[in-house]
Amino acid sequence: MSQPVPIKIYPRLTSGRFNNIRVALVILTQLVFLGLPWLQWNHRQAVLFDLERHQFFVFGASFWPEDFVYLAALLVVSALGLFWWTTLAGRLWCGYSCPQTVYTQIMLWIERLVLGDHKARRKLDAAPNSAGKLLKKGLAHSLMLLFSLWTGFSLVAYFAPAGELASNLWQGQAGPWEVFWILFYAAFTYLLAALLREKVCSHMCPYARFQGAMFDRDTLIISYNARRGEPRGKQADKSAGGCIDCGICVQVCPTGIDIRNGLQYECIGCAACIDACDQVMDQLHAPRGLIRYTSEAALEGKSKGKPAWQRPRVLFYSSLLLGIIGLSVFSFTQRLPFKADILRDRASLVRETDDGWLENSYSVRLINSSESAQRLAISVEGLPGIRLVAATPTVSLAATATETIGVRVQVEPQHAARGANDIRFVIRSLEQPGHLLQEKSSFIGE
């Protein structure tokens, strides 16, 4: 039994208002992704995820492992945002901003630059191997690989300072993990965007599979107006509908589907078919909109007339999103510019001093999470007569710096019960007296 032969898609170049938006978003997303690692903020990289120091910098804010709750909130907001956007606008994300779509578009630009339009590329692939064919193909794929390496470098530059990383690569001094991840992401980009392309959207991406669970009859989709377009036929045929069956809508589709067959999970909502059909309608002096963004309900004349955002599901997602975003922003604006971790010395639980007091030892790790220097005073509370013994009563921290100091806490025996006693370390900012942090710990009595 013969096996089906995979069909390679050669999308035809189109132009129009939606194509202009796609091009603009390709440029914008790549300016952000490729350019952000080079942006400086307060004499350091604006966005840097420093895994070695366990510290993330995002413009004027710095985050530590203790701030994991903000990452969790970001993930929840991203998931809800996906549900909200899909319910409201269908797959506009896929068609305009998804990295797979963006990088595939860039690879197609490279192909057109080197190999020609869709007809020339199809003809070249069908031609027998020759030096000229291998040269053209080699040049096209070399440019794709160079771009893929650039994306790999840019990704790693979010985790290692971009200037330092570039210098180390140039001098052959980059670390093995840096080189590995650059090559890994470059290979990943090349495989998905240069080789697999639309197959990722049709077969690998789970979003295409479960989008039906988030769509309803009022979700924005690309649809063909069969009432106006059918039956298909030439313009001269008075009994024919508005569609002249030119097939251009299929030729420009990056996933190779025929939108006239109805809503299909392969459709990424890029609107290339809309631009192509609008151009044909203009040439025929017919109204645009045979293929357009609409909803199933609107196409059937059953729309309720309410704005799309007033649907119950959209309002539900919107309220959740606003609530989580509001709580996260409030929490972030109220957070103190410093943090502290208290660790009691477990090797020596309790000892008696020369003057008869009980003593526990602690390590205090102070974190300055602000962009300005901090002077912090440390004290301890929770038991009568409790006192703190430290080398210095205050600690000075540079911007975004950390320091660990050793302190001793002493209590008279009659004020400390046997076993664990609850105490509090109090850290105050000397620059901003209203900023006060209390960290719970325990004091071990005899």
Image: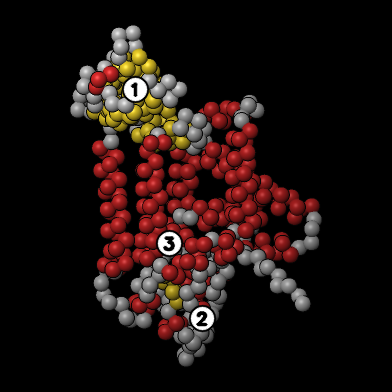
Q: Is residue 204 left or right of residue 39?
A: right
In front here: 436 or 88? 436
Quadrant of the image occupied by residue 12: bottom right
In 3D space, how far apart are the residues under numbered discs 3 and 1 (Cα atoms)?
Answer: 67 Å
Residue 78 visible in the shown view: yes
| SS for callout 1 | loop
What residue do we see at 59% from left, 45% from top? 185
Residue 437: give x, y in percent of width and height.
27, 29
Look at discs 2 and 3 and give the one toward the viewer.
3
Q: Which residue is mark 3?
A: 92
Is residue 311 placed above or below 350 in the rendered structure? below
Q: Which residue is mark 2?
A: 244
Residue 214 rendering spot, x and y as whole percentages: 40, 67
Nearer the observer, 75 or 143: 75
Q: Residue at x 30, y 49 (%)?
A: 325
Disc 2 versus disc 3: distance between alpha carbons?
27 Å
Location of residue 369 (image quadrant): top left
Residue visible at 50% across and 41% down in the picture: 34
| Lateral position of residue 52 relative to residue 409, left or right | right
Identify which residue, 357 or 255, lies in the foreground: 357
Q: Amino acid at mark 1?
A: Glu
Q: Are marks 2 and 3 in contact (CB under 8 Å)?
A: no
